[in-house]
Amino acid sequence: MLVFLHSDPIVSEERFQEIVGIEWDKYQIKIPSFFKRDMIEILGNRSKALNVKFAPMTKQSLEEAVNYGCRILYLGAEMISEEGLIVEDTDHKPLLLTFDDLETLFHKQRVRSRTSIQKEIDEKPTLFVSKPKIDLIIIGSRKGAWLAEWLSETVSIAHVVHFEFNRVPEIGEYRRKLYEQEYILKFTQFFMNELVAGQTVQESFDVAVDDTLSCLSHSFFNHIAESKLQMLIGKGAIILPTQEPNQRDKPLFEYGDYILQPGKIEDLSTQRSPTNLRKSIVPFIGRAEQFSKVIEFLGNYTSDEPPNIDGFLQINGEEGVGKTKFVLEVGWYVYQRNLFPDGVFYIPLRKAHKVSVYTLVDRLSRRLGGTKDRNYANFFRKKKMLMILDDFDGYLTNKAEFPELIFSMIKKFKIPAIVTTTIFDVPKDASLAIQTAFNQYNENKSNIEASYIAQSLELPRLTPEDMGNLMISLTNPFIGKTMCMSFTQAVEHKFQSMIFNGVPARLVNVLQEQKLYHDGELLEISRYYEPFQQLDKRQHSFMAHGQEIPGLEDKIMVFAVSRHSHTFLEAAQAMNETPTHSKSEKRKASKKNFPESPKKKEKKGKVGFLLLVEENQS
């Protein structure tokens, strides 16, 4: 059993300082990933009967992993404390498990293991009995040295991996976090792939380090030599205990009682609720304070007590400030934690005058196995679901008839709903027709809010620091071999005050139009995002019409290739070509004196991942 746990608790700024004591703005940088999908894909390629499990890291999920059997445990954490391990509590807020707490937890596991072994010996004394234990723990955090040392020395875990990186101020905190997290996730994927293939721990570790550096060199550092990259970013992966390297000369699989049978990988994660959300790779910066307030609002509906709120939560903000991105991130967070078993659904209303909300709800109902009788009460009655209604102000302009039947049912059956509305500003010298339309809009808004809105939350513009992080994260860090823009230069860029003014959509538009320059050099979108550029059309169609462009998914998603592969473009053109092979597979072929084909002699990408997938299961 391989168990992957990750902790990302919700917290206010004041509470954050109490628990963690590090800089608040650093915590607000969120890096999307496709870790689960990539991991299942890469291990699935081995065609071995293997059990894996992915879950948020809570005290309960950690106890289950330790007490009920897993050989490899991954502990990822967004919050770091030198006093122990921070997990999520039942309200998804930070909970510190001190080293004393962890000692008690692992002590119970050791006692249980000894008891189980003795029982087996008593029943079948002539049989060899293997001790159930955790053989490997990976601390999936940018700062976890003290936890790794404690697990290695106090708990006596045979192999503990953690990560150490250099702090490079000129690169900027977001870009650092971006490539450091990618290092951690890619290393873990490559490491697991080699271990499952039967390589020794040391061989697997070495191969994973090499392949991970190759990935980062391509995606973030303009193909600089891996030796130079290692010096720049720091040590990267470290395996403990360092004083006993000989114990790493054995494999974890394919020997003794640990020979994996042919078969398929089985995901034992909790079955998630239905959804039509799509995971995004777009950076998410800031908004932690507002995020915590929305989760608190939704907590009224996730508890066992009847909700005491009568109405929707309204998210207000200027056009382009990031309302849609914000509510989709909220939706994905609660979906991952299965807080609404009957579904988390996104309804785009911008084209409400062309595609009615009734039609969109019908599509959702049929997707869930409903009938075509349009009995909307059956869809909402006694359901624990979340509705996200984007561009709710489409009903405030008189272009579309207000769907009172649907919204009244959502309210009647206590279905939590998040709606987004745009704040408009009409200049004083506007024409009489514009002022009249604006007054009518405000009147409609007031009437609807009085009937349906329980709480309102405004999304402010991003700070200059957040916009600076966003700018350097989206752009290629190098022009030739030279670092092109520091974090300070990004914050002070003239466009920040002239054009962007804290509105992320303006930055994205200027970048896509290739109008963003620094010191006379064009700033291009980072190659890290290359494989996701074709998502634009797909995402636009989904946002506008609530459905995919026919055939587009097949064109983008059928080929398997690493998102870091420098062969992405040719793979996209070849479309259905056989996935390329990793360095590690080439090494193994060479060791076994297998002749390499001409295709293998070329420098290809990493072990294939499904690039863009039905992210509902990611």
Image (tube, rainbow, N blue to C red):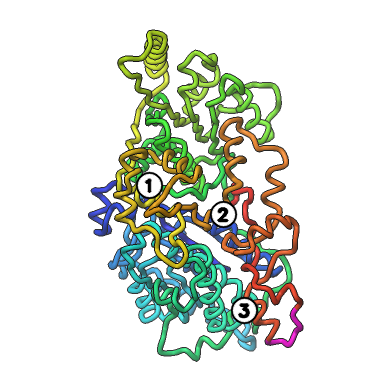
Quadrant assignment, res 301: top left
For the residue labelled by badge 1, is the local secondary structure a helix, a strand or a loop?
loop
Type of secondary structure dominating the magenta stretch: loop
> What residue lies at 29% left-to-right and 49% top-to-bottom?
492
Q: Amino acid at mark 3?
A: Phe
> What residue lies at 72% left-to-right and 42% top-to-bottom?
551
The image quadrant where one finds the N terminus is bottom right
For the residue labelled by badge 3, is the local secondary structure a helix, a strand or a loop?
loop
Give the vertical position of 239 relative to 393 (above or below): below
Instruction: Give the label on residue 91, or none.
Output: 1
Q: Amino acid at mark 2?
A: Glu
Residue 19 appears left or right of 363: left
Magenta-highlighted residues: 591-596
Relative to the observer, which residue lies in front, 164 or 93? 164
How far is mark 2 from mark 1, CA to CA? 37 Å
Instruction: Give the label on residue 253, or none.
Output: 3
How far is mark 3 from mark 1, CA to CA? 38 Å
Residue 7: x and y in percent read: 42, 57
Q: Earlier in the sequence, mark 3 or mark 2?
A: 3
Q: Which residue is mark 2?
A: 530
> What residue lies at 56% left-to-right and 41% top-to-bottom?
277
